[in-house]
Image (cartoon, rainbow, N blue to C red):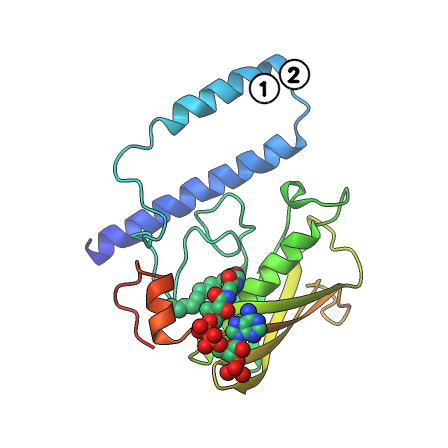
Amino acid sequence: MSSEDLELRREAVAGLGRELRALMETVARTETPTEVLQELAGEVKRLEARFTGHRRERSEIPSVDVFPFGLRMYSPATGHGSAFAPPLEIEEREDGYIGRCVLGVAHEGPPGYAHGGMSALLLDELMGWACAAKGLPAMTIALDVRYQRPVPVELPLLLRAEVTGIEGRKITVDGTVAPESDPDAVLVAAQGRFVAPDLERARSLFPGAKNYQA
Ligand SMILES: CCCCCCCCCCCCCC(=O)SCCNC(=O)CCNC(=O)[C@H](O)C(C)(C)COP(=O)(O)OP(=O)(O)OC[C@H]1O[C@@H](n2cnc3c(N)ncnc32)[C@H](O)[C@@H]1OP(=O)(O)O
């Protein structure tokens, strides 16, 4: 695919993701009549039949992605093509990574507050990016999440991740979630341990990443 076509496809993927995300939020909030819901289920099913062409296999890397060091368009945390992703916008800083996002009612656990699994998902992802930035794309082996205060939905959030130690292929990372307006008022704090798989393990886990090199 030419770079123009790739860019165009990424924009299309992101555009569809945006609409699906908005739809998911509307669905989570709607009290529309039951018969309308029934009709809409049929319409969505018909829509699904329009996704023709190649359907990727389980470990195939999407044509719009760069793996393992780059863009993941369908990541449930950062993917602009994922209806499920807020999506988390990640930025590199001198002392680690920060992420920004706003969660919606579709991400609710307790009414008005984010599901704890969402905070863990977003932190896990950002902490993984902090490992990759050290040249060690890694997988989580342990994540200790402390929920200090509930995380309101519809509130701009600031997440931070910082590598605190590297020992061979093992990395330790700290992460936090806070309101963007008050970054010191930590709502969730996490400590993670990650391991960068060795080359042989990485190749067997990710056979779709054909050009992977340690
Ligand atoms: C292509 C690569 C890309 C990587 C992914 C990028 C995408 C990320 C996207 C972001 C997504 C967000 C993140 C996600 O969602 S990642 C998804 C959730 N995490 C997982 O599924 C990971 C499952 N675990 C494994 O597959 C293996 O453990 C891995 C592959 C990580 C290491 O297996 P490998 O065969 O390579 O390692 P090794 O056996 O030589 O051990 C090395 C050292 O590590 C220690 N140890 C190992 N495992 C554990 C454990 N479970 N507990 C405690 N310790 C453990 C071990 O004792 C040894 O220590 P030492 O004896 O040297 O002291």
Instruction: Please identify the quadrant where the C terminus is shown.
Output: bottom left
Q: Nearer the viewer, residue 10 or 45?
A: 45
Q: Do the CB atoms of the residues marked 1 and 2 lie less than 8 Å apart?
A: yes
Q: What kind of residue is marked 1?
A: Leu
Q: Is residue 69 visible?
A: no
Mark 2, Cα crowd under 10 Å, few <14 / some 14-19 / many 20+, is few
The answer to whether residue 81 is above or below residue 34 is below
Q: Position of residue 51 (x, y in %)?
A: 33, 32
Classify mark 1: helix, strand or loop: helix
Q: Position of residue 99 (x, y in %)?
A: 57, 65
Q: Amino acid at mark 2?
A: Pro
Tell me the residue that label 1 is attached to.
Answer: 37
The circle drawn on residue 84 is: none
Apparent side of residue 27 relative to residue 53 in the rendered image (left or right): right
The relative height of residue 39 versus residue 95 in the rendered view (above or below) is above
Picture coordinates of residue 186, whole percent (x, y)? 75, 68
Q: Residue furthest left?
A: 2
Q: Which mark is residue 33?
A: 2
Q: Residue at x 52, y 15 (%)?
A: 39
Residue 200 visible to an observer of this rendering: yes
Image position of 156 with respect to 146: above or below: above
How far apart are labels 1 and 2 at the CA level?
Answer: 7 Å
